[in-house]
Image (cartoon, rainbow, N blue to C red):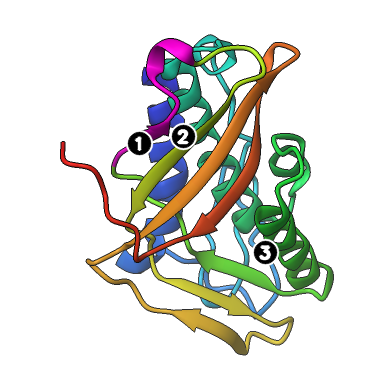
Amino acid sequence: MTHTFAKFAAVTALAAMVLTGCGNDAAPGTVAAEEGPQPASSTAPAINVERPETNELAGQPTLDGAKAFLYYYFELESYAQLTGDTTAMLESMDKAPQPAAQAKHINAVYDDGGWILGGTENIQNVFVIDPDASKIGEGVEVTVLLPSIPTAYSEFTKDGSVSDTREWSSKGTIHTAKLIFRGGEWRLTSLEETPGVELPEQ
């Protein structure tokens, strides 16, 4: 999973750069012409962000494969928020209404000329609730709990106005996710925020 974590860290770092004053100085809704990836800022969306790549581990019907896929999914979510490109995010789902609605909202923001800053989910751990690790395989739905500390989040309209914002909190939140391995690949079947759920002891 080294490659997956590295790519996830890169996307996270790109979003975090704005917190240290590394945003560009373009007019609201415009992008700079410099080569290479540019982070989103309060004045412009990110540009030249590469789509995350998965690895072989995320394609295995095992406990480690399920975990690798989940980290990869959140890379795709961050990429979608940075770019407005939800194609890969949607391709990783199978009848997952909540994340599908999120992807639709991301599309709407960018289609209207706006952009998103932050909102990266920093997953702290993956707790498999059901089934036992030995039973994970083809066609078996897996339920997990994902404690996360998301970065601060802001949505901007075409003219640079803030339309929505959520502050960073050290308390974070917890997501409950379900996924299944079919046809040689994992698919997300459900993902929702469940902050009141109690995590198992480590």
Q: Earlier in the sequence, mark 3 or mark 2?
A: 3
Query: Vertical placement of 197 versus 190: above or below?
Result: below
Q: Which residues are magenta?
A: 125-135
Q: Residue at x 43, y 38 (%)?
A: 144
For disc 2, the marked residue is: 71
Residue at 62%, 46% (x, y): give it: 190
Query: Mark 1 and mark 2 in contact (Cβ < 8 Å)?
Result: yes
In the rendered structure, the answer to whether residue 78 lies left or right of residue 174 reads right
Q: CA distance from mark 2 to mark 1?
A: 9 Å
Contact (CB < 8 A) between labels 1 and 3? no
| Of pointers 1 and 3, the one earlier in the residue sequence | 3
| Residue occupying image coordinates x 47% and y 71% | 153
Q: Residues within 10 Å of mark 1 (few under 14, many from 20)?
A: some
Quadrant of the drawing holding the N terminus: top left
> Which residue has dot 1 on it?
126
Determine whether the residue tagged by mark 2 lies in a helix, strand or loop: helix
